[in-house]
């Protein structure tokens, strides 16, 4: 009974955060050299491709081998400390309100589908392997915008040290536009910096369409 009550109090969004954190630590354990490998700020503590592949990295190469489940496992893997930290911060902000609307199992199903859709979209434009919760979380933020369009996001403004409220429409819309322009730039030969922009775009579109459908159907 005690364990049941504990599980009942843990939200899916928090559970996903714990799983992503645990998966990141396991990836580092499989590749201890990552702890001392010299990298830049954004690649700090970056597990090797071999370690990530062993845990379920996805891409067209993985599906060609019949590893369809990697469409889901890849959304719990991350390529560096800041990668997992920023993704989990976004999930912490946008996840709970969407989960409260969809309920626990509904949110879990939606999150997994958003991640799978995002990964497939990436494979349609790039043969590069893909990991990360970004596509799934983009789906969550898209749904958040559809369900709570008049909400604000509380942001810390680094240059002044102040806290400001930014319209969710402007905040999420800006990131969507940045990803669209970045994807077009990459398709025209620009450097993609190893970021799966199309996965983000597909996540936003899927999430917003899903949230809008809930409102339209009055579910």
Image: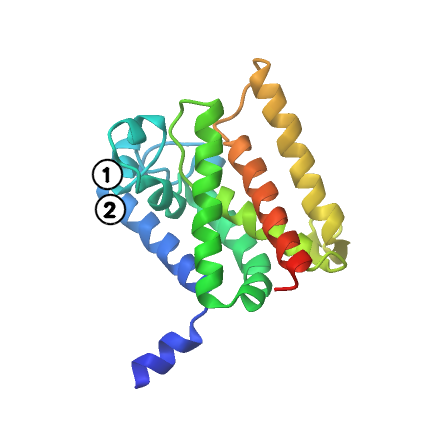
Looking at the picture, how far across and down is residue 49, in whole percent? 30, 32
Give the residue drawn at x 59%, y 51%: 210
Question: Is residue 193 toward the left or the right of residue 213 in the image?
Answer: left
Task: Residue 96: name its quadrant.
Answer: bottom right
**Residue occupying image coordinates x 35% and y 27%:** 60
SS at mark 1 in the image: helix
Query: Can residue 159 be seen?
Result: no
Q: In the rendered image, which quarter contains the C terminus?
A: bottom right
**Which image quadrant is residue 127 in?**
top left
Towards the viewer: 154 or 200:
200
Kindly identify which numbered label has been placed on residue 138: none
Q: Nearer the viewer, residue 209 or 85?
A: 209
User: Where residue 61 sits: x, y (%)?
Assistant: 31, 26
- Name the residue tied to disc 2: 29
Residue found at x 40% / y 42%:
78
Residue receiving disc 1: 54
Is 118 or 31 nearer to us in this picture?
118
**Residue 29 x, y percent position in the rendering:** 24, 46
Relative side of 216 to 5, left or right: right
Query: Residue 169 appears at what percent x and percent y?
Result: 74, 49
Q: Secondary structure at mark 2?
A: helix
Cβ atoms under marks 1 and 2 closer than 8 Å: no
Asked if 150 appears above or below 200 in the picture, the reply is below
**Sooner in the amino-acid sequence: mark 1 or mark 2:** 2
Query: In this image, 55 relative to 164: left or right?
Result: left
Instruction: Give the mark toward the camera: 1 or 2.
Output: 1
């Amino acid at each position: 009974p005690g364990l049941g009550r504990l599980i009942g109090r843990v939200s899916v969004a928090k559970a996903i955060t714990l799983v992503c954190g645990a998966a990141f630590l396991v990836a580092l354990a499989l590749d201890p050299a990552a702890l001392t490998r010299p990298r830049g700020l954004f690649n700090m503590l970056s597990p090797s491709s071999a370690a990530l592949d062993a845990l379920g990295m996805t891409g067209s190469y993985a599906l060609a081998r019949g590893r369809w489940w990697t469409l889901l496992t890849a959304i719990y893997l991350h390529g560096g400390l800041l990668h997992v930290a920023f993704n989990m911060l976004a999930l912490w902000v946008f996840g709970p309100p969407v989960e409260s609307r969809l309920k626990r199992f509904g949110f879990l199903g939606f999150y997994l589908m958003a991640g799978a859709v995002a990964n497939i979209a990436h494979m349609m434009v790039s043969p590069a392997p893909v990991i990360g919760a970004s596509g799934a979380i983009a789906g969550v933020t898209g749904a958040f915008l559809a369900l709570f369009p008049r909400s604000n996001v509380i942001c810390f403004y680094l240059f002044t040290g102040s806290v400001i409220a930014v319209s969710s429409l402007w905040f999420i819309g800006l990131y969507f536009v940045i990803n669209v322009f970045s994807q077009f730039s990459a398709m025209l030969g620009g450097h993609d910096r190893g970021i799966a922009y199309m996965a983000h775009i597909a996540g936003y579109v899927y999430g917003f369409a899903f949230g809008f459908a809930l409102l339209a159907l009055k579910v």
